Image: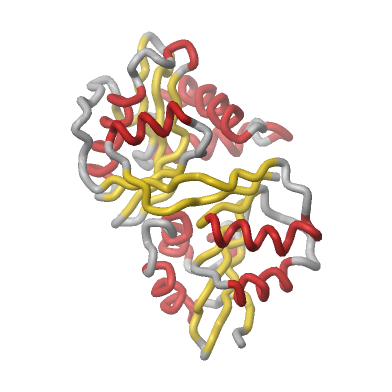
């Protein structure tokens, strides 16, 4: 039987070996651990491990999101036993569907109810540029775009998640996050006459893979043919500048987005799920 405990710096090699078993799906956690190790302050959360024979065989990242990493029924039961007595600190669970949904089953009696359960989210990847023509107006954002891009990011987040990212006095923190994405070259935009028409960001990245988020077409332009060339350009820019493999996950019920990603060339690798609070 394994033991659950917070991970310490000496556990990092074992944790990285675990993450690398599925580096594409584990991109979010891999990117954070690469920069911060397991230091909670720098990591933005706690990293708990399930150790067997002194090696990390499963893990859970617990920050604003709760993210399981290669968990098993046994390790999920052990993690749930540790998590259940305390208050819920995260605003969502996200990760491979079988792991997320089973962990939520174990924790829901203590932490429920969820605001929304998105139990089927195809996780898609591309490792080559798209055959679809690229929109020549899609480009990396620069800091001078911040005031134009920020409202589009807020609108997209609110539409996607169902709550505003700037609620409860979070405006400055969210603005700083968008500015950070721009400064790191991870925000891509089509801006015409001072208005954002298309945008997407890379939310997490390692040298091997990056994960797109925040894909958005201005409502007034939806159905006008911007999405496919915009995504084609975004994939090419991300592959050239950030990582050779591009990933994302999408809600099963978002038919227009799924059609766009399929046309551009994304292929399904697995299924994610998200629990929203």
Residue 82 sits above or below residue 233 on the image: below
- The structure residue drawn at horizontal position 21% and vertical position 39%, both measured from the top left corner, is 129
Display coloring: secondary structure
Residue under the image location 29 percent in, 56 percent down: 208
Q: Which residue lies furthest to the bottom in this view?
A: 53
Horizontal and vertical percent position of residue 79 = 66, 71
Q: Is residue 109 above or below residue 238?
A: below
Q: Check the image and report above or below for 81 versus 152.
A: below
Q: Quadrant of residue 180?
A: top left
Residue at 38% in and 46% down: 124
Q: Which of 271 and 78 is in front in this view?
A: 271
Q: Quadrant of the N terminus?
A: bottom right
**Viewer-side residue, 188 vs 257:** 257
Give the side of residue 123 with respect to residue 54, left or right: left
Q: Where's residue 197, x and y in %?
A: 40, 17
Quadrant of the drawing holding the C terminus: top right
Q: Is residue 83 above or below residue 266?
A: below
Residue at the image position 67 percent from the left and 73 percent from the top: 77
């Amino acid at each position: 039987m394994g033991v659950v405990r917070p991970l310490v710096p000496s556990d990092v090699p074992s944790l990285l070996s675990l993450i690398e078993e599925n580096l594409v799906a584990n991109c979010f956690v891999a990117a954070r651990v690469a920069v911060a190790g397991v230091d909670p302050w720098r990591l933005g959360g706690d990293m708990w491990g399930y150790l067997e024979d002194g090696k990390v065989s499963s893990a859970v990242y617990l920050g604003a999101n709760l993210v399981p990493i290669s968990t098993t029924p046994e390790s999920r039961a052990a993690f749930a036993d540790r998590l259940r007595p305390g208050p819920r600190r995260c605003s969502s669970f996200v990760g491979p569907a079988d792991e997320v949904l089973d962990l939520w089953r174990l924790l829901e009696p203590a932490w429920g109810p969820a605001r929304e359960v998105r139990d089927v989210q195809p996780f898609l990847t591309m490792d080559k540029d798209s055959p679809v023509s690229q929109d020549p107006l899609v480009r990396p954002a620069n800091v001078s775009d911040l005031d134009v891009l920020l409202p589009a990011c807020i609108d997209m987040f609110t539409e996607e998640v169902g709550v505003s990212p700037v609620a409860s006095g979070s405006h400055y923190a969210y603005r700083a996050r968008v500015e950070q994405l721009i400064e790191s070259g991870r925000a891509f935009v089509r801006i015409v006459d001072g208005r954002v028409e298309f945008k997407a960001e890379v939310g997490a990245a390692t040298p091997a893979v990056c994960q797109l988020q925040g894909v958005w077409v201005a409502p007034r332009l939806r159905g006008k043919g911007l999405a496919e060339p915009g995504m084609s350009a975004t994939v090419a820019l991300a592959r050239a500048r950030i990582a050779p493999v591009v990933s994302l996950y999408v809600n099963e019920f978002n038919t227009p987005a799924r059609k766009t990603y399929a046309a551009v060339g994304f292929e399904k690798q697995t299924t994610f799920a998200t629990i929203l609070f």
